[in-house]
Image (tube, rainbow, N blue to C red):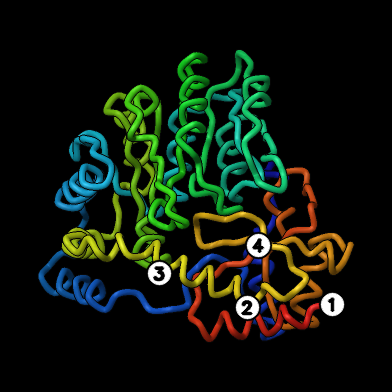
Amino acid sequence: MQSKLPNIGTSIFTVMSQLASKHNAINLGQGFPDFPMSAELIECVNKAMQSGGNQYAHTNGVPLLRERLAEKIKYLYDVNINPETNITITPGGTYSIFCAFSTIIQPGDEVIIFEPAYDSYIPNIVFNGGIVVPIELEFPDYTIPWDKVKAAITPKTKAILVNTPHNPTGRVFTKDDILILQEIVLSNNLYLISDEVYEHLIYDNKQHETVMKYPDLFARTFVCFSFGKTYHCTGWKLGYCIAPENIMKEYRKVHQFNAFGCDTPKQIAIAEYMTNKEAYLSIGAMYQEKRDYLRGLLDNTKFARLPSSGSYFESYRYDAISDEPDTVFAERLVREFGIAIVPMSAFYQKSTDHKVIRLCFAKVKETLDAAAACLQKVH
């Protein structure tokens, strides 16, 4: 059989998690919380199941959930979104992004992405017959070289993908970034896919600049979100996509004949739980406290922190410790020091190595203490 993804192997997250398990190491590699989700939300699921909410939901998602999302968007961003025509519930944020690519890409279309990049983007584009055009963020601050973006556009360019807050670097788009992006998208008649799954995980008094606040730009955009990141339930695999009606119609054709629909009782539960605004308004402060706590534990080490104001990841340079390739250094951390992380080169198509590792701080204090104790011993 001829592979549709011949250059794609096992994901770095699987590799590092397997190593962590083999060596009984603390795992700050894969991005998921190790603390329990809301007991109230779990009870909402039980209630939905016991009340009979166990059959197929509408392919676009439970209507009440879409209504609650529209209300939330109006409350947070003062943007009017039609729950009937603009919102589709999906089995996870990654699926939401895949469907967006599948909706617009024709064989030979070029898609601009920024690296380091979340690992699903490139396979999504390649699987759909597209050509990846990677542009590296400028190290060490991971700023966007907009001049290079403009220079990379050709008659074959179909779309740009952006991610804010950014995984893996934690960079947050500014209003100026969005305005430049808008000019590029509109002047070249492109589509935009905006991965905003970490919208609430944002720190240092920064604001989330959702694309939805810019009507002209939103008119050509798929915006993708994750309930798992917001409610600490990554294993539920529930997310959603928001887009203008004309392109959402095409998106729903792909979705209908792929997953068709999503887990009904969990949709009902989230719709009920969303009346608790504090549940999503408070998580930024909660995660910043964890980020700052880990920072304090590592301040007296030779690991040099890189800027991060979003997501639940933070990156550190180790060049004052070793000149080993980051993949070798990462494996040594597991074997010799009992700590699993992710080497940043895994997020580049060309395995660009700046001697940087990524840590996930979505962990309880005891896990962060134990992880820091391992890293404090690294030499």
Q: Residue furthest right?
A: 323
Which residue carries the number 2 mark?
297
Compared with residue 185, is residue 224 higher up or lower down, i.e. above or below?
below
Helix, strand or loop at label 1? It is loop
- Give me the residue at 77% from left, 83% from top: 377
Return the mark for residue 156.
none
Q: Are marks 3 and 1 in contact (CB under 8 Å)?
A: no
Q: Mark 2 or mark 4, which is nearer to you?
A: 2
Q: Mark 1 or mark 4, which is nearer to you?
A: 1
Helix, strand or loop at label 3? It is helix
Helix, strand or loop at label 4? It is strand
Compared with residue 289, is residue 75 higher up or lower down, i.e. above or below?
above
Alpha carbon separation for disc pair 2 and 4: 16 Å
- Give me the residue at 35% from left, 29% from top: 214
Which residue type does callout 4 highlight? Answer: Arg
Alpha carbon separation for disc pair 1 and 4: 18 Å
Which residue type does callout 3 highlight? Answer: Met
Q: Nearer the viewer, residue 206 or 168?
A: 206
Horizontal and vertical percent position of residue 34: 47, 77
Horizontal and vertical percent position of residue 196: 43, 46
Alpha carbon separation for disc pair 3 and 2: 17 Å
Which residue type does callout 1 highlight? Answer: His
First of labels 3, 1 by sequence position: 3
Which residue carries the number 3 mark?
286
First of labels 4, 3 by sequence position: 3
Q: Nearer the viewer, residue 234 or 259?
A: 234
Alpha carbon separation for disc pair 3 and 1: 31 Å
Which residue carries the number 4 mark?
358
First of labels 1, 2 by sequence position: 2
Callout 2: few (<14), some (14-19), or many (20+) C-alpha neighbours within 10 Å? Answer: some
